[in-house]
Amino acid sequence: MSYKRIMHNGEPHYGKHVIHHSIECNDNILDEDKIAEFIIELCDGIDMVRYGDPFVARFGKGIEIGISAVQLIETSAITIHTNDGARELYLDVFSCKDYDPDIVSYMVHKHFDPESQEQEALYRK
């Protein structure tokens, strides 16, 4: 199964899925252009090939207003959801090409300077 090219615990997996949550981010979390810049730099940092430009939009009502963004990559997708009031970032990076999850958290810290971050990596068979 050569399409399962990510090795984890001695077994081949189809993809890696990093789930990231940041709390109390800086003002960049409120800016659609800054979110787009982050996505582009993240793709470069984890060596992913972007398919087109990121789609970034602000919408929602009341306490659920925020930005959502999607970046297709040759090996899957990156998605972001934010919450303006709480200044929280929810980020998913899924790819069948391996990458370093530490770069994801570094890039989030660089762009959004969160008070705290939580992240886990799941491996899909």
Image: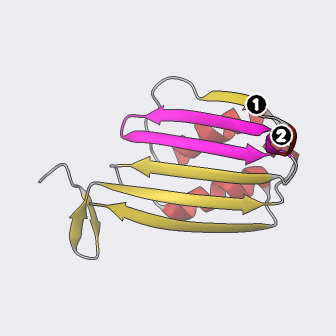
Q: Is disc 1 placed on a helix, strand or loop?
A: strand
Q: Which mark is residue 30?
A: 2
Q: How crowded is mark 2: few (under 14 residues within 10 Å), some or many (20 or more)?
A: many
Q: Residue at coordinates 52% horizontally, 42% vertically from top-left?
A: 78
Quadrant in which the N terminus appears: bottom left
- Of the residues under marks 1 and 2, which one precedes in the sequence? 2
Q: Is disc 2 placed on a helix, strand or loop?
A: helix
Residue 49, how many percent across, how many down? 43, 35
Q: In this view of the protein, can residue 69 be seen by the observer?
A: yes
Q: Which residue bears the numbered disc 1?
A: 58
Amino acid type indicated by mark 2: Leu
In this rendering, which labeled residue sits more in front, label 1 or label 2? 1
Quadrant in which the C terminus appears: bottom left
What residue span does the magenta drawing correspond to? 64-84
Residue 62, how many percent across, how many down? 87, 40
Q: Residue 18 carries which label?
A: none
For the stretch drawn in magenta, what is the main secondary structure? strand
Q: Residue at coordinates 71% horizontally, 52% vertically from top-left?
A: 89
- Residue 75 colored in magenta in the image: yes
Residue 59 higher or lower than 114, as above or below: above
Residue 19 higher or lower than 94, as above or below: below
- In the displayed structure, does residue 11 sit left or right of residue 84? left
Furthest-bottom residue in view?
A: 9
Residue 27, how many percent across, how many down? 88, 46
